[in-house]
Amino acid sequence: MGLSVEAPGARLRQVRHWVFDMDGTLTRAVHDFALIRRELQIPQQADILQHLAALPAEEAAAKHAWLLEHERELAFGAVAAPGAPALLRTLHTAGCRLAVLTRNAQELARLTLREIGVEDVFEGVAILGRDEAPPKPHPGGLQQLAAHWGVAPHSLAMIGDHEYDLQCGRHAGATTVLLHVDNRWPALADLHFADCAALLEWWRDAAG
């Protein structure tokens, strides 16, 4: 039976290449996006990165600089999401390859991962921020990671807490895993767990 027609749980158990969103997935969510939009004069329903990309260069640069410093302050106070370090180390010990694909800046992603004590389980080139790959929901980051690892995109798992993470995974053909108390996007999520701790429990049970 081909990988694409297996049950989602069976597919995920076979996955050896795991790609994680960061904020709200590996860390406790702290971003106040309403505040960010107010400070940067962005309409409340607009995508922040898309809005900034459409601005004149000088204005965009100033607002990106503010965003970077705001996110830097948050990174220094990052707290791991429940079960995240244990999940990452379990997968790493099992020989899985791990990556982060975030709409945050790469330097701040590294800082955040260092703050929660898990930077060492990721290859440096497998931490992609908004300047290293097209921001999610575009699948370019997953495609880039698949090419780096020498595997097909459909052999990856994309794990996140937001619709953009799931759309990114869907567009790439990856197995999509939602980590959220509620299954808010059942049409996009192949599998749903409350958090990293619940996913780790499933992984251990599936391993027998």
Image (spheres, helix red, strand yellow):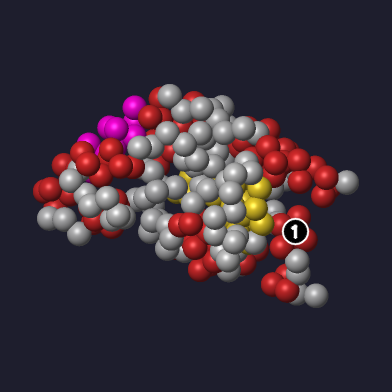
In terms of depth relative to the viewer, which is nearer, 55 or 46?
A: 46
Residue 99 visible in the picture: no
Label 1 crowd bin: few (<14), some (14–19), many (20+), radius 10 Å: some
Instruction: Report the magenta stretch's main SS.
Output: helix
Residue at image mark 1: 9
In terms of depth relative to the viewer, which is nearer, 24 or 43?
A: 43
Residue 130 visible in the picture: yes
43 shown above or below 76: below
SS of the residue at dot 1? Answer: helix
- Asked where in the image residue 68 lies, by quadrant, the reply is top left
On whether residue 173 falls in the magenta region, the answer is no
On whether residue 69 falls in the magenta region, the answer is yes
The residue at the point 43 percent across, 60 percent down is: 137
179 shown above or below 84: below
Quadrant (top left, top right, bottom left, bottom right) of the N terminus = bottom right
Residue 25 % position (x, y): 54, 42
Residue 83 % position (x, y): 65, 34
The residue at the point 12 percent across, 55 percent down is: 56
The residue at the point 16 percent across, 55 percent down is: 55
Residue 170 % position (x, y): 54, 66
In terms of depth relative to the viewer, which is nearer, 107 or 203?
A: 203
Q: Which segment did they paint magenta? A: 64-73
What kind of residue is marked 1? Gly
The residue at the point 44 percent across, 47 percent down is: 102
Total labels: the figure holds 1
Horizontal placement of 5 versus 54: left or right? right
Horizontal placement of 94 versus 160: left or right? right
